[in-house]
């Protein structure tokens, strides 16, 4: 399991400002201690601390650490789920404050499991990772058709994220990729257990995420954003 | 003189080289064929047979393969399965069209589209305590005689023929997967961290029900059984679903208990099914008495290193499966399928301890030509000494 990141200063991934890490919140997110996350974040809000700094300096990199540990095979699905759930609790608290303070999301993205696929655990993880990484997320749920993604784009989504778990449903990604092929302003990112980079290229997707962490990289890259500093 | 299918399988599972590598296809769900490719195969080979389903369960979508097709597929095993209680089958047969299928545990499936059902009915999603488990009134009645009323005669008949190995598969006596069915997968995985005592209690309670049914099933099977299939999906495309430590703490004791229970009642070999990359757990499986590992998902993480698998574990466990259902069977050409069969045969086959089959169910996206190509390649290239 991860060690405590005591006293370190990290660089915010988007604006490259040195920010101080809240060690206690970092650990609470990494270890998925939802009650502690809620307590710490609520206290920060009550004390009128800078929630943008809390988000960018601690919450985002902490969840990214969990994602990286998952990618490296150091933690597994339950640990990832419990951290994501803790992160969601924190976002629920600070989300309205961020909106009121004029904090702008990096971009709006939509995400959904494709038509015929009701699996949503991986899709939900990516959605939380995206929210936690500063994106506004339009979560379309499962069994989503081309029209659902088109409607989300009309609501402002710049990136369409498609998820599929099954070999029998991955082909449902093709019509979505085809639908947006000639629209440069809309990027299509694909991922899920059966999806490979080769498949992503074959259907003409703009990017591929091999897991939740990698999906964030893919979304950022397709928008021309810099890779995340470590 | 060629061996019978049963002799072939028994040699292979005793780590000896039979006349050819046995084929395991068309029996249970994980070794089975979905209805669409089954219809396609029947058409290709000119067989007239009804579109029946294993476990008398259309929503599962897996075909009950007729005997003529089983022979054409060169399958060396035949199955004996249990059934849901007659009342449950009747209730589902007469329910409203497109409504949820619900099984004897209270879990079930929702319809996505034609011939496509998804496990989406979870009866105790909010349970987090033993009291919640006690309060649930939908636990299955494993003493219902209609679950196993057919088993004795089916097993006796196969044994009397003495031609095929008998692979018995009572449905989903898989504690981890059953816990997912009862709560929803993400809910139960969270509970393993947030309510570990409850998660253990649920797994143990499920394990007790599994043993109740397993005991009755094995009693009916008598000595007429060669392999019994149990399992739990523990792997993903890259790694494990849960950590090895969590497996050893939560699930290994439940699996070990079920396997001991079985081994006290039968000399049949234990076939353990788990999708995904489970390499970090294979030593654990061997330790608790697993004899055969299925399905050897060759596109998943370190399971792809077949030479290493054979070298490291081949003396202590039999490999069953190995033909990729993710890319090769659904997307490959007939030539691709033949090449993959040769590769798997040549790697896992030497010395015995190997049975070939598809990695999990042959899904509806697999061309029937590729299924025939797979089984014919085993017949062509699978004879010992392997070339």
Image (tube, rainbow, N blue to C red):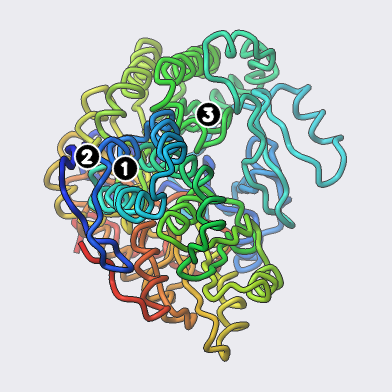
> What percent of the width, then of the height, locates residue B3?
33, 44
Circle 3 residue? B178
Task: State whether residue A9 is above or below residue A228.
Answer: above
Q: Where does residue B18 sit, x and y in percent of width and height?
A: 26, 45
Is B293 drawn above or below residue A72 in the view shown? above
- Circle 3 SS class: helix
Tell me the distance, in whole angstroms, between the alpha carbons under discs 1 and 3.
Answer: 18 Å
- Marks 1 and 2 belong to one chain: yes
- Please give the name of the residue rendered at 52% of the width and 89% of the height, measured from the top-left corner: A184
Which mark is first along the chain, 3 or 2?
A: 3
| Cβ atoms under marks 1 and 2 closer than 8 Å | yes
Query: Residues under labels 1 and 2: Cα distance?
Result: 8 Å
Q: Are marks 2 and 3 on the same chain?
A: yes
Q: Identify the disc placed on residue B280.
A: 2
Disc 1 element: loop
Question: Which corner quadrant of the image does residue B290 belong to?
Answer: top left
Circles 2 and 3 in contact, beta carbons < 8 Å: no
Mark 1 neighbour density, 10 Å: few (under 14) some (14–19) many (20 or more): many
Q: Position of residue B170 (x, y in %)?
A: 54, 27
Q: Chain of mark 2?
A: B
* Residue situated in front as seen by the camera: A189 or B334: A189
């Amino acid at each position: 399991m991860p060690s405590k990141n005591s006293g370190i200063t990290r660089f915010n991934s988007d604006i490259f400002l040195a920010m101080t890490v809240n060690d206690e919140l970092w650990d609470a997110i990494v270890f998925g201690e939802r009650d502690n996350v809620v307590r710490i974040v609520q206290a920060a809000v009550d004390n009128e601390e800078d929630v943008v700094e809390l988000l960018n300096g601690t919450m985002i990199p902490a969840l990214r650490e969990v994602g990286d540990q998952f990618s490296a095979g150091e933690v597994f699905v339950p640990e990832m789920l419990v951290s994501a759930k803790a992160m969601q609790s924190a976002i629920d608290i600070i989300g309205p404050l961020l909106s009121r303070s004029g904090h702008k999301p990096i971009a709006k993205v939509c995400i959904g499991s494709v038509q015929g696929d009701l699996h949503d655990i991986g899709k939900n993880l990516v959605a939380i990772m995206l929210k936690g990484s500063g994106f506004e997320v339009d979560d379309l749920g499962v069994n989503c058709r081309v029209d659902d993604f088109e409607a989300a784009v009309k609501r402002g989504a710049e990136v369409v994220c498609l998820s599929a778990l099954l070999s029998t449903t991955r082909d449902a990604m093709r019509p979505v990729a085809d639908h947006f092929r000639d629209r440069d302003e809309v990027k299509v990112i694909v991922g899920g257990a059966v999806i490979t980079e080769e498949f992503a290229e074959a259907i003409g997707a703009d990017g591929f995420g091999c897991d939740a962490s990698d999906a964030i990289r893919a979304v950022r890259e397709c928008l021309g954003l810099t890779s995340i500093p470590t | 003189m060629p061996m019978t299918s049963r002799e072939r399988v028994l040699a292979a599972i005793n780590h000896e080289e039979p006349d050819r590598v046995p084929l395991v296809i068309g029996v249970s769900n994980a070794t089975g064929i979905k209805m669409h490719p089954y219809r396609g195969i029947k058409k290709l080979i000119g067989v007239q047979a009804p579109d029946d389903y294993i476990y008398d369960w259309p929503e599962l979508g897996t075909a009950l393969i007729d005997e003529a097709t089983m022979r054409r597929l060169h399958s060396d095993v035949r199955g004996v399965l249990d059934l849901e209680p007659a009342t449950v089958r009747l209730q589902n047969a007469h329910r409203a069209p497109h409504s949820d299928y619900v099984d004897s545990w209270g879990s079930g499936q929702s319809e996505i589209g034609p011939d496509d059902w998804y496990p989406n009915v979870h009866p105790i999603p909010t349970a987090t305590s033993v009291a919640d488990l006690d309060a649930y009134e939908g636990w299955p009645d494993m003493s219902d005689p209609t679950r196993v009323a057919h088993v004795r005669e089916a097993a006796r008949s196969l044994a009397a023929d003495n031609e095929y190995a008998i692979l018995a598969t009572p449905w989903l006596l898989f504690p981890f997967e059953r816990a997912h069915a009862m709560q929803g997968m993400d809910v139960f995985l969270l509970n393993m961290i947030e309510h570990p005592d409850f998660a253990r209690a649920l797994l143990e309670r499920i394990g007790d029900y599994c043993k109740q049914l397993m005991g009755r099933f094995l009693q009916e099977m008598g000595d007429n059984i060669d392999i019994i299939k149990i399992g739990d999906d523990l792997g993903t495309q890259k790694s494990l679903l849960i950590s090895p430590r969590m497996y050893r703490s939560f699930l290994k004791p439940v699996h070990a208990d079920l396997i001991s229970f079985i081994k006290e009642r039968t000399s049949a070999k234990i076939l353990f099914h788990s999708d995904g990359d489970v390499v970090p757990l294979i030593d654990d499986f061997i330790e608790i008495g697993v004899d055969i590992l299925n399905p050897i998902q060759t596109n998943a993480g370190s399971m792809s290193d077949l030479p290493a698998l054979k070298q490291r574990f081949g003396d202590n466990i039999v490999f069953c499966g190995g033909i990729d259902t993710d890319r090769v069977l659904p997307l490959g050409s007939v030539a691709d399928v033949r090449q993959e069969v040769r590769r798997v045969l040549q790697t896992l086959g030497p010395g015995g301890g190997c049975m070939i089959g598809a990695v999990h169910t042959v899904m509806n996206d697999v061309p029937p030509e590729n299924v025939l190509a797979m089984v014919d390649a085993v017949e062509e290239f699978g004879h010992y000494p392997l070339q």
